[in-house]
Amino acid sequence: METTRISRREFLRWSLAGAAGLILGDLARHTPLLAAQPRPAPRARSVIQVWMWGGPSHLDTFDPKPNAGNDYTGPLNTVVETNVKGIVINAALPMLALQADKYAIIRGMAHGNNGHETAAYMMQTGHAPGVGLVYPSLGAIVSYFKGYSNGYTGLIPPYITLTESQGRFAEEGFLGPLYKPFATGGDPNQKIFTVDGVVAAGITEQRQRDRRDLLHGLDTLGKAMPTEPAFAQLDACEEKAYELILGDARKVFDLSQEPDELRDRYGRSKFGQSCLMARRLVEQGVPFITINYGGWDTHKQHFEAMRQKLPEFDRGLATLLQDLADRGLLDTTIVWAGGEFGRTPKVDWDAPWNGGRGHFGPCFSVLLAGGGFRGGTVVGASDAKGEKVVERPVYPQDLIGSILELLGINPDAPLPNNRGLDLKVMPASEDGPGRGRLKEII
Amino acid sequence: MYHRWLMTVILLLFATICALAAPPVKPYEAETWTTPPNGVDAHVDAALKAQGATWRNPCSDEVFIRRVHLDLIGTMPKPDEVEEFLKNPRPDKRAALIESLFTRDEYADYWSMKWCDILRVKSEFPINLWPNAVQAYHQWIRAALRDNMPYDQFARALLTSSGSNFRVPPVNFYRAVPNRAPDGLAAATALTFMGTRLDTWPPAKREAMAAFFSKVAYKKTGEWKEEIVYLNPAMTEPVKALLPDGTTAMIPGNADPRETFANWLISPKNPWFARAIVNRQWAWTMGHGIIHEPDDLRAANPPVSPQLLAYLEAELVRARYDLRHTYRLILNSRTYQQSSITQDDEKPALRFAHYTVRRLEAEVLIDALCWIGGQGESYSSPIPEPFTFIPKGQRTIALADGSITSSFLAMFGRSSRDTGLATERNNQPSDTQRLYLLNSNDIQQRITRSPLLRDIIRKSKGNSQEVARNIYLTLLSRYPTPQELLVLQQYAKKPDMQPQSVLVDTTWALINSKEFLYRH
């Protein structure tokens, strides 16, 4: 592993590349290829983001505090030894305990914001709000630098959301709609995973072809203005759409091609099958997949919800890590699991919460695995009750910056925007006030 | 008096020389003009002549009724409305239709949607208005448009109000910004009302303009998410600010600097205010600004026809900022009523002078699909307190909140409402939109369950020609051509083709046609 570590000298080269980017100015602004070179070879090719929106409790998952008392732990008051000596997690995650050698736990995640929409923006873009700009999410950045404008040729869009779009802010930010995620819709846990527009139920291939002929036969306005550029654009989109509708690429969504035994291991839940789907997309070379995994905003009756939620999460994510490793994909695939914040360590037992946890941005946990992140590690620590970061705080910009680094995306590359401003991906100077990028696990 | 008489002579002369350049393309173009030329046309004619360009043919009544419905009320005309209009022999029926559309509920809905894009009305990041204030603000904007509040009063209310975001809705202008510092407020004001991007100004001028907003302050109340916008009473020293035209303003310590700015802004002599809005009106209806982008007014981006712009500005001021007056001028012009069919030798500089085809906005398209499918979308907001109640079957153009989660609206490029830039709305086609329209269960279900189709079958009594006529009238606001009927007959004759499939596939093909998806 040492040989592929990014040395200080390479870091210097990066900065020089950044300077070159500045000199290239406008030319580089709209050509990610130019702006992105030269740089060290990327170690990660794809990212699977398990977005636990609503915010999972860090105490009930990766930062347990069994000695903090019932007002903090509730019934989830036991821990489990993992397969890495010295690392324990909440006993509610027994399968993940057996995968700890593959992941790093960030226990000092912090941004201090307790509002869903602002916290989600910070965690997904790494930028602070209030500057009058909406930066693109990490997924949109990856889709810009590793998508169609930079060598990606797959028919499956480069930024996929399983299954519903998130919608708390516009993920493409100022990059514009080309870099929006493609939300599949449907449910991979159903007999047929119908994907909006790609896999429809009940239309034979012959009928698809007949329909296309009919559409062209009735294209009266199009024929009246054959040189209209707006229509040429639509025709080009149509051609690409049909490559997917009539071609083989859509078979990636056919989960019946997977052995039943493996599907069972992932868990027969929407989340479990989404994890399996994500692995299949990684195999196809899709660079960014978000599993939009809601249900963590448990203000009321938190522990009842966790009884259903945690086993499903444990099974799906643990199997994903094992499966990626078995196929040799984990080295090049980053898995990032976490939400926009954690939850209040102290439980609110009173009505109407009846054992609930609120939003908590000052201290929470995030899991990182694969793609060059060193597993079997814990970064940072919280205090005895999980209320404060006491060691190695990690800020959203440190997290996003580290992932970008492993993906080989130049942090100083310019980002195009609709206002002609000089904006960059995530320069190292924008690291958080702590120790910055996660060099200890890269 | 004299100049009005002269104008009439010019217009008459112009009318006589306006014979059709090329034979009309059926069914999109008419044989002759029934619309008299107006003041707009004289200026456009001069611009065309200066470039050696010609007029396009008049659009047909079929095209006109669809176009003006989409442009004024964001809604496709119903088949009976189309039939009635086509049968109507009156030569002034187009003008009468325009008048009637101003009074429709959808007019207020559709234009509120457009204004809420510019005014950035949404609950969530980065605007964070929150649902209560979104509803109050949207209602205020909608009422202003419904009642045709003069545009200068509209701007003044937005710029000078103080009070609670729930009780004094226009104060939300100062809350609906991604940056609440004085320079952020100045940038939002300049973009909204002057159509100019403050980023392009020299820093000193930017700072001097920000001074007008330096006293704006915010405070919370005991009520959940209530916020008061007020002037900071601690700032008692006089404010020295610089108006965008270079005049220095000394504002006494007890005065509201926003008033000084607003008074300057809405003065008839102001070079920006009327120009920015009439240019926006032009871009909204014609598809391309006289200055383009319509919110990028600056010296280096001059109008293609300064005369036309000056004429519209003067008309708006003369009509005391009645926006419907300028809409009337544009929509009743031959310029607007030209065919959208491009000719070979068209000059890019003259894009403003012709009706430009463009894809329907996300909200307009989903409303049309819901109408066909007989079922509205169900919308909800992820913000729990207070839950936003959105009645079932609510039209999408009437949605107040730009944060309502919807894959469709995201896919089809509704405005993100982050900064209010016109480019935040994106009507470009994409592969994923195409996939959705060509091959989604959603579209298939809307067609197979369509009550409109059921009615058509019942009405047509098994006559397949009649079915085709009614489907065309419903979806494309016109009757099918003989060529199209032939294509459909051949399709029905394919082996193993079920009559039900012919009907479904015809509907599918028309929904996927350029004519349906694009205003034209």
Image (cartoon, helix red, strand yellow):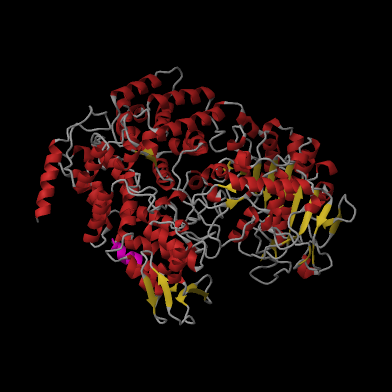
Left or right, residue A30 beside residue B468: right
Q: Residue A251: give x, y in percent of width and height.
A: 63, 30
| Residue in the foreground of this view, choosing between B502 and A332 | A332
Specify the principal SS of the magenta part: helix
The residue positioned farthest toward the right in the image shown? A85
- Where residue B275 appears, as percent x and y from the top left, is 31, 56
Q: Residue placed at 23% from the left, 50% from the top?
A: B329
Q: Residue A293: percent from the left, percent from the top?
A: 65, 50
Judged left or right of residue B240, residue A393 is right
Relative to B273, is B4 on the left or the right? left
What residue is rendered at 48% in x and 78% in y?
A: B232
Count of picture labels: 0
Q: Is residue B131 visible?
A: yes
Closer-to-camera residue (B37/B433)? B37
Which image quadrant is residue B247 in?
Answer: bottom left
Give the quarter of the figure containing the N terminus of chain A: top right
**Residue B233 among those drawn in magenta:** no
Percent coordinates x, y for residue A409 in the rendering: 67, 44
The span shown in magenta is B148-155
Residue A1 shows in the view: no
Is B368 positioned to the left or the right of A48 in the image? left
* In the rendered image, the vertical position of residue B15 relative to residue A211, given as above or below: below
Placement of A435 over or under B306, stated as above or below: below
Q: Quadrant of residue A349?
A: bottom right
